[in-house]
Image: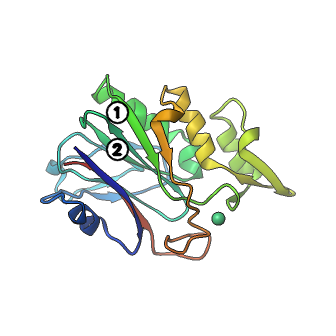
């Protein structure tokens, strides 16, 4: 069985896991670095801090989680519950193809993984304005970025990170019918922390575990 969820601001992973009936879970200590590193987490890590932006687990009760406040959290799992992953994809992660790097990592470990993906609340495409440098960094990862951007002012555009993620995942065979996306905008909805709205410390936790 898989248990998973996208928390609100102020909710901590240990509580969220318990509320969903997973007892004796191991929650690895992690530090996100806005890169494209994927790491396998196990209970043997103990107190070791894993620096990465995507975490993969194959052991039951080992929780994969990421913290976000506008960036896109992605949860991935195999329908037979052999492997799970949590991914933090801000624009840097999207530009570095972190979602497809995680899919590759999963398939190296479980070659016939039947993957499903859920994207959680993030800053929406009608709010997330970025500079041209962000657009060009993300444009390198897909054939045509134009459906995912809208010009606002000179040098600035609204960008649809989730749209780009759908496209990237399609390139590695994870088709839209295997992906669900919560379109709640963290910037518009105060249930969630939003870095752009001014939250500097608070984040929401997204988590997944084989139970
Ligand atoms: Zn919004």
Horizontal and vertical percent for residue 120? 48, 54
Q: Is residue 150 left or right of residue 201?
A: right
Residue identifier under label 2: 85
Residue at the right extreme, as displayed = 154
Q: Quadrant of ligand 1?
A: bottom right
Q: Residue at x 21, y 64 (%)?
A: 18
Horizontal and vertical percent for residue 133? 72, 49
Query: Is residue 206 shown to the viewer in this render?
Result: yes
Which one is in front, 45 or 57? 57
Tell me the element at label 2.
Answer: strand
Horizontal and vertical percent for residue 53? 42, 50
> Alpha carbon of mark 1 to alpha carbon of mark 2: how far?
8 Å
Residue identifier under label 1: 106
Toward which corner of the image does residue 163 lie, by quadrant? top right
Q: Residue at x 58, y 47 (%)?
A: 162
Q: Residue at x 55, y 53 (%)?
A: 90
The answer to whether 148 is drawn above or below residue 185 in the figure is: above
Toward which corner of the image does residue 67 lie, by quadrant? bottom left
Q: Quadrant of the N terminus?
A: top left
Q: Does label 1 or label 2 sit earlier along the sequence?
A: 2
Would you call the spot at circle 2 few (<14 residues within 10 Å), some (14-19), or many (20 or more)? Answer: many
Toward which corner of the image does residue 204 lie, by quadrant? bottom left
């Amino acid at each position: 069985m898989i248990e998973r969820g996208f928390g609100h601001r102020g909710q901590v992973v240990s509580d969220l896991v318990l509320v969903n009936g997973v007892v004796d879970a191991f929650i690895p200590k992690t530090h996100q670095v806005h890169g494209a590193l994927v790491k396998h987490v196990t209970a043997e890590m103990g107190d070791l801090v894993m620096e990465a932006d995507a975490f993969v687990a194959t052991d039951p009760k080992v929780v994969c989680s990421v913290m976000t406040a506008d960036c896109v959290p992605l949860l991935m799992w195999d329908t037979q519950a052999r492997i799970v992953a949590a991914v933090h994809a801000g624009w840097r992660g999207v530009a570095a193809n972190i979602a497809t790097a995680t899919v590759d990592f999963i398939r190296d470990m479980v070659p016939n993984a039947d993957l499903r993906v859920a994207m959680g609340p993030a800053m929406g495409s009608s709010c997330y304005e970025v500079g041209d440098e962000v657009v060009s960094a993300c444009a390198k990862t897909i054939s045509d970025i134009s459906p995912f951007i809208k010009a606002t002012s000179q040098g600035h555009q609204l960008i649809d990170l989730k749209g780009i993620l759908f496209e990237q995942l399609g390139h590695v065979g994870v088709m839209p019918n295997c992906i669900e996306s919560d379109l709640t905008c963290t910037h518009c909805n105060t249930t969630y922390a939003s870095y752009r709205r001014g939250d500097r410390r608070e984040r929401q936790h997204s988590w997944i575990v084989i139970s």
